[in-house]
Amino acid sequence: MELGSIFLVLAVLVVVGVYLYAPLTQRGRRMATDQSHEISSLKAERDRVINSLQELDFDFKLGKIPTEDYPEQRSALLQRGADILRQLDEIAPASTAGANAEARIEKAAAAKRADSAMQVIEVNDDDIEAMIASRRKQHKSKSAGFCPKCGKPVLVTDHFCPSCGKSLK
């Protein structure tokens, strides 16, 4: 056999080997993608549970939820959040895997409450008074009162009533 034919046979064997090995690498990538989608959906569900927990606490403080129903609903949400965190820990163990799952949900809900409370904008009384005065000034410049004939509202710029056509000047 010639040397060229040996190289040709080896090249064909390498191409066949790569062709046969390619599906094995695709399967590994597909599994990693499926796992990342599952992690993403579990994190989204965790965020929904935390938001529901915040809304439940807020509604309870406002008196919208009866006192006897609140503990049951809260414990159900905490249990659902803890289950989600356990599933997340099984898929991708976190650094806080040793912590209690319900305590982690409580901590996340408290952190979100603190973030939303910090978004309150401070406005002093002088700024509020200035805003009110400018609003009143704008309102006065737009309205000229009412038509003497039909009683519909008219603007300062109107020369005739838009409803009945009576001259206003």
Image (cartoon, rainbow, N blue to C red):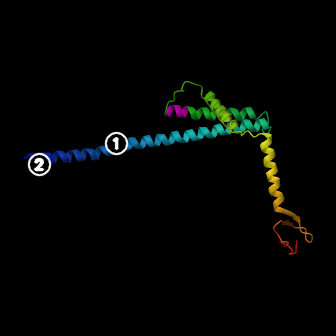
Please say whether residue 19 is one of the residues in the magenta stretch. Answer: no
For label 2, the SS is helix
Q: Nearer the viewer, residue 69 or 145?
A: 145
Which residues are drawn in magenta? 86-91
What amino acid is labelled 1 in the image?
Answer: Leu
The structure residue drawn at horizontal position 84% and vertical position 62%, both measured from the top left corner, is 143
Q: Nearer the viewer, residue 130 or 70?
A: 130
Q: Earlier in the sequence, mark 2 or mark 1?
A: 2
Q: Is residue 141 left or right of residue 98?
A: right
The structure residue drawn at horizontal position 56% and vertical position 31%, both measured from the top left corner, is 86
Q: Position of residue 126 (x, y in %)?
A: 80, 42
What amino acid is labelled 2 in the image?
Answer: Ser
Question: Residue lying farthest right?
Answer: 148
Q: Mark number for residue 129?
A: none
Q: Is residue 101 left or right of residue 116?
A: left
How would you classify the magenta stretch by its main secondary structure? helix
Q: Nearer the viewer, residue 162 or 61?
A: 162
Q: Is residue 19 left or right of residue 34?
A: left
The local crowd at label 2, few if under 14, some if 14 to 19, many if 20 or more residues have their Cα within 10 Å, is: few
Q: Position of residue 157 (x, y in %)?
A: 81, 67
What distance separates the C-alpha of mark 2 from that of mark 1? Answer: 30 Å
Figure quadrant of the C terminus: bottom right
Question: Residue lying farthest left?
Answer: 1
Q: Which residue is mark 1?
A: 24
Q: Position of residue 149 (x, y in %)?
A: 92, 72
Mark in front: 2 vs 1 = 2
Q: Position of residue 82 (x, y in %)?
A: 60, 32
Question: Residue lying farthest top?
Answer: 98
Please say whether residue 88 is one of the residues in the magenta stretch. Answer: yes
Q: Which residue is mark 2?
A: 5
